[in-house]
Image (cartoon, helix red, strand yellow):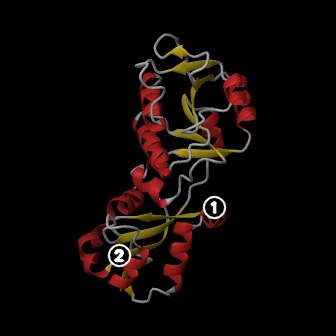
Amino acid sequence: MINLIESKDNPKIKNALKIANDASYRRKNGVFFAATSKVVLDIIDAGFAHQAVFVLADEYEKFADRLPDKNVYTVSQPVADKLSEGKTEDGMWAVFEMKTADEDAIFTADKLLVLQDVQDPNNMGAIMRTALGFGYDNVVVSARCADVYSRKVIRTSMTASVKVNVLKVADMVAFTQKLNEKGFTTVAACLDGASDLGTVKTSLPVALYIGNEGQGLSDDVIENCKIRLKIPMSDRIESLNAAVSAAVLMWELR
């Protein structure tokens, strides 16, 4: 029997919202919040363990055959309104358990994406979606990057941000030096002293570095990368959006 939650003050609802809105709480408890039926069902199909799934009571029958047998709750419209963030969410939300980062997979990957201080959730989501599409299954993020487990990044990435293997690194310079020692071709996307994309040959394993939307990569990270690359384009504009740049570079270095 599916339990109905009618109160916005239900402890399960309060906990779900805290998970949705508090990154430190997510990390501490190893869980994340996802919204919309497409996103939630995709994460379920990907094999993630769930703690709770909430479905608008009027919508439950539509999805019943694809939902787990346990820890599924129907919710009233007021509760659904409480869980929703905007009109694009269609009546399903869930709390899932995070997967532990596989550090060994990072250092044995053929292709690695490294992000430094990419802070816009939309950019982060778009980059993660492209990374998964181009076979970059392993991603490294700096401490100041947008949280890959935020509901916006998950939604924008179409769940790619939770499917790729993501490792958070505190010291990007030390990490880059370690990659160099392990034989990675470390490639900095930058402008100063950079060669045009397509003019320099790279060999696997390769690690592509993308920096902050406004500042780019830090000088110390660039100095420790083996290759500097830029995307050749019109002199009427200085640079591309971080997500677009990442897509072009990942395609070329795939």
Which element is circle 1 on? Answer: helix
- Return the residue at label 2: 55
The answer to whether residue 231 is above or below residue 52 is above
Q: Residue at x 57, y 16 (%)?
A: 194
Could you classify mark 1 by the number of other residues whose Cα lies within 10 Å: few (under 14), some (14-19), or many (20 or more)?
some
Residue pushed farthest left?
A: 62
Q: Residue at x 62, y 32 (%)?
A: 217
Q: Residue at x 55, y 45 (%)?
A: 165
Q: Quadrant of residue 108?
A: top right
Q: Position of residue 157 (x, y in %)?
A: 42, 49
Q: Position of residue 106 (x, y in %)?
A: 61, 37
Q: Position of residue 48 (x, y in %)?
A: 48, 59
Which disc, if any, is residue 125? none
Which of the two residues, 238 or 64, is positioned nearer the viewer here? 238
The answer to whether residue 129 is above or below residue 238 is below
Q: Are marks 2 and 1 in contact (CB under 8 Å)?
A: no
Is residue 119 at all visible to an observer of this figure?
Answer: yes
- Return the residue at label 1: 27
Which numbered disc flags the more N-terminal residue, 2 or 1? 1
The quadrant in which the C terminus is found is: top left
The answer to whether residue 191 is above or below residue 82 is above
Instruction: Give the CA separation, mark 2 to mark 1.
Output: 25 Å
The quadrant in which the N terminus is found is: bottom left
Q: Position of residue 242 (x, y in %)?
A: 49, 36
Residue pushed farthest front?
A: 236
Is residue 73 at all visible to an observer of this figure?
Answer: no
